[in-house]
Amino acid sequence: MNSGELSPEVVFHIGWLQFTGTALTTLGIVAALGLLAWLLSKRLRDQPGALQTAAEAVFIAMEDAVRAVAPDHVKLLMPFVGTLWIFLVVANLTGLIPGLHSPTRDLSATAALAILVFLSVHWFGIRDQGLRSYLRHYVSPNPILLPFHVLSEITRTVALAVRLFGNMMSLEMAALLVLLVAGFLAPIPILMLHIIEALVQAYIFGMLALIYVAGGLQLQQLKQASQGKK
Amino acid sequence: MELNWTTFLLEILNFLVLLWLLKRFFYKPLQNAIARRQSAIQQQLDDARKMKKEAQRLQQSYENDLAALEQGREEAHAKLQRELNMEREKQEKHLTELLQQKRQKAHVIEQRQLRESHRQQEKQALEQGSRFAASLLQAGAGPELESRLLEFLLDALHKLPAEQRVSLQQSLAGQHGPVEVSSAFPLSAGQRQRIESGLNELSGHEVQSHFRQDEQLIAGLRIAIGPWVLGANLRDELEAFAHLEEAAPSE
């Protein structure tokens, strides 16, 4: 929340590669989360401590959420969706640290995540049902619907990226503006708002990704179920 | 708000790396730990269920044993009660019989004592009667009475049954010495003559007689022939009267 710039500044160049603050922050988040996970994996006990209990609570909560949407594919979807939630929560909350920006206020980052979700939908769908069977749903019940399916895929992916980016960027901009107007009285409510917004946006993004992926997986099952009924 | 491709690619790469790291160091170990703990909990639950079943089985077994013991106790108690009742009845019967025997014995003793008392009273009454009669007869005794008793004796000698007569004759035959004739008052010669005649007639031969006076006889005569004693005197009669109870057959 230190700057009102819409585009993150490039920190350094390596040839044509431009390393922005977003990329470096993400790298730091990945390193921190990886280190934390590694340390946790070394300290797992049958009688859990406070950290392990918290980690298990997070894990079970995410697993239950995935099971509620796709009960037959919990093991398959849980790592991807869980990683999305964990990364987004941490990334969204990073903006609270003085001197750092939320990576998710950068459209490049949200677009990358949206593209990953887009690819995951097809990856899991094809992996589960096979290429022909999966692609067939684009032309069912009528090939006329193909353009609409394609359009739907593109728009929802763009919407996914832009929604997160817009919310996080606007949140930081609004916070900056409030700080400029209200001085030192507003930071705490703004911080509370930031936390809530970060959690909500992470939840929405992960849940939408889960719904999209589960939708791709369960289309074939619904089709088989309807054929079985006939 | 422009798209930086380097950032875009690095974000994808970073996310994939994070996905791998979390899968490797977070999801799998955590899942294994949870599964391990669930397995341990499940094992504990299974053990607890087994223990519960075992405890229920043992409880059932103990209850059955307790019921069997209770039943055995009740049966033993009932058996003991029956045996006690039988023993009590037996003892009661035995005591009743014993009591009955004692009562009978006491009754017999009482009857015997009563009879003895009656007999003593009777004996005493007879003795008193005899003494009274003796004193009364003694006062009234005299030669006249003795003469009548002599007549009575002689008449009795004549009327003796044949068996007694034979027996007397045999005694007289075996008699050594004179026959002793006792009288309360002195006998006259005629009276002595009549007695000797009677004895001679009875024996069929001459019988020597020795006469003597015995005031104890009060009135009348007594003739001793061997083991036989022919009496017609008040003393013998009174004594016979006094001992009438002894001569009567006992009950």
Image (tube, rainbow, N blue to C red):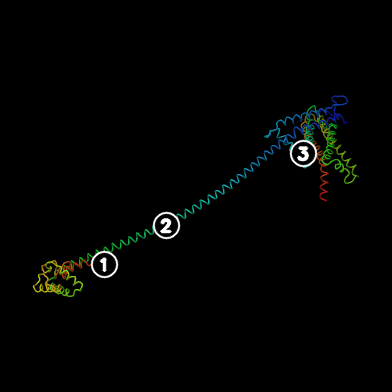
Q: Position of residue B130 (x, y in %)?
A: 19, 67
Q: CA distance from mark 3 to mark 2?
A: 89 Å
Q: Position of residue A174 (x, y in %)?
A: 82, 32
Q: Position of residue B176 (x, y in %)?
A: 13, 66
Identify residue type, mark 1. Answer: Pro
The residue identified by callout 1 is B249
Can you tell which of label 3 and label 1 is closer to the viewer? 1
Query: Is residue B220 positioned above or below A145 on the image?
Result: below
CB under 8 Å between discs 2 and 1? no
Instruction: Write down the chain letter for disc 1.
Output: B
B88 on left or right of A188: left
Would you identify the image quadrant in which residue B242 lies? bottom left
| Of the image marks 2 and 1, the number of the one nearer the N terminus | 2
Q: Are marks 2 and 1 on the same chain?
A: yes
B58 on left or right of A1: left
Q: CA distance from mark 2 to mark 1?
A: 42 Å
Can you tell which of label 2 and label 1 is closer to the viewer? 1
User: Residue at horizontal 74%, vertical 30%?
Assistant: A38
Element at badge 3? helix
Location of the N terminus of chain A by quadrant is: top right
- Label at residue A75: 3
Q: Nearer the viewer, residue B11 or B226?
A: B226
- Label at residue B90: 2
Callout 3: few (<14), some (14-19), or many (20+) C-alpha neighbours within 10 Å?
A: few
Q: Nearer the viewer, residue B25 or B226?
A: B226
